[in-house]
Image: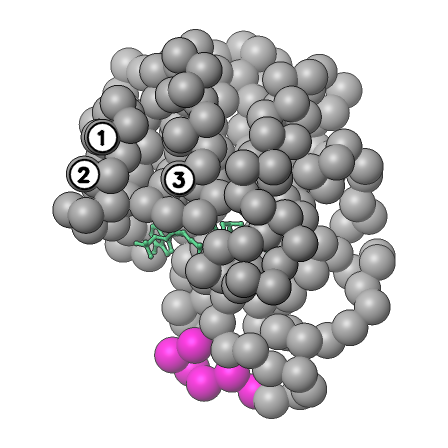
Amino acid sequence: MTVLVAGASRGIGFEFARQYRADGRRVVATARDEEGLRKLQALGCETLPLDVTDAASVAGLGWRTDGEQFEVAIVNAGVYGPRTDGLQPPSQDDFDLVMRTNVLGPMRVLAALQESLPRGARVIVLSSAMGSIGQRAGASGWLYRASKAAANSVLKDASMVLGSRGVSCIAVHPGWVQTDMGGAGATLPPERSVADLRRLIANLTPEDNGRFYSHDGSTIPW
Ligand SMILES: NC(=O)c1ccc[n+]([C@@H]2O[C@H](COP(=O)([O-])OP(=O)(O)OC[C@H]3O[C@@H](n4cnc5c(N)ncnc54)[C@H](OP(=O)(O)O)[C@@H]3O)[C@@H](O)[C@H]2O)c1
């Protein structure tokens, strides 16, 4: 089985690469810089450079993975942006960075990978419960929330196109995870979140296509 992890230099993406390698899987993992690529090579991953905000870089992912067949493709790269509590409008630069990374990024990566996803493949987009409109209980980080709600729409459309070819596409919430983004006060170590997510991925069936799951297997409303 070959696993692709897009955005694997640290945090949840790195942990996916580490655990799948420890499980003996072939892992193709991406990072933006040399340091990230070297860390992944030390795990035994095959590595590719990728910046999801750069169209040429994603085009490079497409041609470098031409002929690959990924059983699992994880679109993990993400940024949080400004840590707001109220209705502070984001700067144009913050808006562009968060939306280009969290929304345009998955659109480009999913398009680039579509010929490398065989029947039975699983596509995982790292979303967040913060992107759910149906269970919203606060407005902190509203730019991040908007970006993950939009990423959910992207995942849903991918599930429409790829589901008809026997590929299962899901959005996942990894929990509140102790990473640079989640912070030290988060409730879950990355090891636990990723172990849960790998179990969820392993048990996916075609009926799961187009759903939004928490790491514990519960369904999250869009
Ligand atoms: N941690 C949480 O509690 C939590 C909760 C819900 C959802 N999530 C989601 O889970 C995913 C991973 O989060 P994390 O906590 O592991 O975050 P993190 O520790 O901040 O790591 C983010 C990862 O995304 C990569 N990345 C950022 N911008 C990129 C770009 N333009 N191109 C390629 N890679 C890029 C980073 O690479 P560099 O090292 O090059 O910056 C890094 O590998 C994100 O999508 C996040 O929104 C996290």
Q: In this view, does 16 lie to the left or right of 42?
A: right
| The CB of the residue at mark 3 lies under 8 Å from ligand 1 | yes
In front: label 1 or label 3: 1
Q: In which quarter of the image is residue 49?
A: top left
Cβ–Cβ under 8 Å for marks 1 and 3: no
In the rendered structure, which disc, 1 or 3, sits on the residue that comes first in sequence? 3
Label 2 and label 1: CA atoms lie apart by 6 Å
User: 44 above or below 60?
Assistant: above
Other-residue count near label 3 (Cα within 10 Å), few / some / many at <14 / 14–19 / ≥20: many
Q: Distance between the residues labelled 1 and 3?
A: 12 Å
Amino acid type at mark 1: Ala
Q: Does the magenta stretch include residue 92?
A: yes
Q: Is residue 48 magenta?
A: no
Residue 7: percent from left, percent from top: 37, 44
* Contact, mark 2 vs mark 1 (Cβ under 8 Å): yes
In the shown orientation, is residue 52 left or right of residue 49?
right
Mark 1 and ligand 1: say if the CB distance to the nearest ligand atom is below 8 Å: no
In percent of width and height, residue 155 lies at: 60, 41
Using the image, determine if residue 190 lies above or below residue 206.
below
Q: Name the residue under label 1.
A: 42
For the residue carrying disc 1, how many other residues have a C-alpha within 10 Å: few (<14), some (14-19), or many (20+)? Answer: few
Disc 3 from disc 2: Cα separation: 12 Å
Location of mark 2 (residue): 38
Residues drawn in magenta: 89-94
Does the residue tagged 2 have its C-beta within 8 Å of any atom of ligand 1? no
Identify which amino acid the numbered label 2 is placed on: Arg
Mark 3: secondary structure? helix
- In the figure, residue 45 lies in which quadrant? top left
Residue at the disc numbered 3: 14
Which scheme is used to colour this image of the protein?
Answer: one colour
Residue sitting at 68 percent across and 86 percent down?
A: 86
- Identified at 25% across, 49% down, the residue is 32
